[in-house]
Image (cartoon, rainbow, N blue to C red):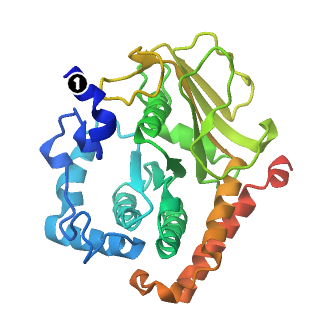
Amino acid sequence: MDLDAIEQLESTVYNWSDFNRIYYHPRSMNAISTHQADDVVNPFDNYTIGKDAYVENEKEMSVFDDNFRLFAEECDYLQGFQILTDIDDAFGGFTEGLIHDIRDEFAKIPVLTYGLSDSCLHYRNDRMKQKVALNRALSMTRLGELSSIYEYSRYHTSAIIAAAIETNSLPFRLKKNAATLAESVSRLTYVRNTKLATLSVTLPLLKEKKGPLSLLDYESNIDKEDIYSQTTIVRGSEQYAFPDLTNPLVANYHVETMLPLPESYPRLFPSHDRQVPMMTQFESGARVKASVEHQISSIQDINFQEFHEFKLSRDDLLETKETLLTWSDMYNKDDMLE
């Protein structure tokens, strides 16, 4: 890769496709035929529009039957599905339609959904903030109910979260002593029906111990007893000592291979090494409670009648709030310790 181009990536890259170097199968890239990007007349910016767009898109193109099913049927051993979706706009609703079809076709296969939202929300006007809050609340409740595990993240740069998700999925891809996606899901939901999880990352993992960076902006102060179940993956650091080796709801993995950094990876570290050690922690516990409560407060004072484009009734909004309150109660520390 041209060294001059590498140095200019910070100022020239706006979309992932600007530096993508992967060759995709022609049938793995599917456009949404009903909308255009950055369309100010018909913006793709609310949950209901996305849900309707999935139905219309399937009527015109049959992507699920023709393309999605093709790749699923080619798998020798289908462990499950990992889905990454933006939840600030209409993609949350679009993803609901997709997961519905997955559940109809693959009822017993685990679905791990990563809900990704923008960390620069403070730059938007008040109405846009409320619209995004509605999108996030609807995505958390509806995608959370449909998914086996729903992980909610706020991102500053896609490079960090991509490294975290790639490392978190390593146990499913190991040739020796591998774990299945179903086993990981079962561990996280064993205590109760706790479908929400958090993903934290330490990047790079240094010899001096530092706490992991949570991919949540709103979290509670936690201690060891606040964690119901946890999967920790360490790659490339032999000095790291796992703290808990006896708890059956805690799984630890050590992988010798460090995180490889391609030339297009942002220059986040002072070192010019093309690989770094790192750690991820994927857990279910009281940490997620603060995030759920923030979602509740963010939609508490919204007048849903001002957002007619969502086509929501008062009962729809009350049901969303009730689901969030129920999930918040599930993550009480005292209940877990009983």
Left or right for 196, reference 85: right
Left-right relation of 250 to 95: right
User: Left or right: 253 with respect to 285?
Assistant: left
Which residue is tagged 1? 4
Q: Position of residue 298 (x, y in %)?
A: 62, 69
Residue type indicated by callout 1 = Asp
Q: Nearer the viewer, residue 183 or 31?
A: 31
Estimate the x, y position of residue 319 in percent, counting from the top left: 59, 78
Which residue is at a point 56% across and 88% down the rendered structure image?
314
Pick whichever, 231 or 102, lies toward us.
231
Q: Secondary structure at mark 1?
A: helix
> What residue appears at the point 49 percent right and 34 percent down from the top-left corner?
164
- Which quadrant holds residue 327? bottom right
Is residue 4 placed above or below 87 in the rendered structure? above
Q: Is residue 287 left or right of residue 224?
A: left
Q: Where residue 268 sits: x, y (%)?
A: 45, 28
